Amino acid sequence: MKIIFLDIDGVLNTDRQIRMNNLEQIKDIKFDPIAMKNLKKIVEESQAKIVITSTWRVHHQDNGYLWRELIRNFEMYNLDTNILLDITPVIDTNMKTELREKEILDWLTKHKNIEKFVILDDQWDMGRLNSHFVRCLSFRGLTNENAEVAILKLK
């Protein structure tokens, strides 16, 4: 199985799109259409499943507002929500993003059937997982160039 470890803010929910939403006075969270198109391209070309690493994952269990917005955006961009396989464990309740590498490693130790994986995030570093890491810039999010690199890492 191929996996995309996916952050939301800075990858799909870009700084650029947040500004646009504010200018247009959009009440719901609308992900960046370019980033969503690029995510869809990665999923379609790699047949990968998605594991959410974002702090948004804490809203999964109770179907909270941010999780519902995630699902709504996937549906809005015609991404099958069945590709959302899982969420990474929460190691620290303060949700320190510098622990993301450890959370991904913890998830990987519990799921042995992973053939390849890529990490899409706007962090600076993924430590021991840097060879799987595609860094997105928070203003632009998941670009076509990022998508091409991710697809190559999943081949």
Image (tube, rainbow, N blue to C red):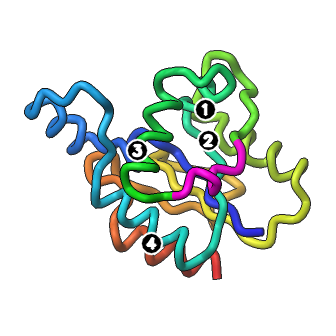
Residue underneath mark 3: 73
The image quarter in which residue 22 lies: top left
The first of marks 4 and 1 along the sequence is 4
Measure how far apart labels 3 and 4 are at the Cα level: 15 Å
Q: Which mark is residue 119?
A: none
Q: Residue at x 74, y 41 (%)?
A: 102
Magenta part of the chain: 80-86
If you read the primary sequence from the N terminus, does the residue marked by circle 3 or circle 4 appear first?
A: 4
Q: Which numbered disc flags the more N-terminal residue, 1 or 3?
A: 1
- For the residues labelled 3 and 2, the Cα–Cα distance comes to 17 Å
* 12 left or right of 131 in image: left
Q: Position of residue 32 (x, y in %)?
A: 29, 50
> Which residue matches tag 1?
57
Q: CA distance from mark 2 to mark 1?
A: 7 Å
Instruction: Check disc 2 and report the residue beneath it.
Output: 53
| Secondary structure category for the residue under label 2 | loop
> In what element is the residue under mark 4?
helix
* Mark 4 residue type: Lys
The residue at which mark 4 appears reads as 41
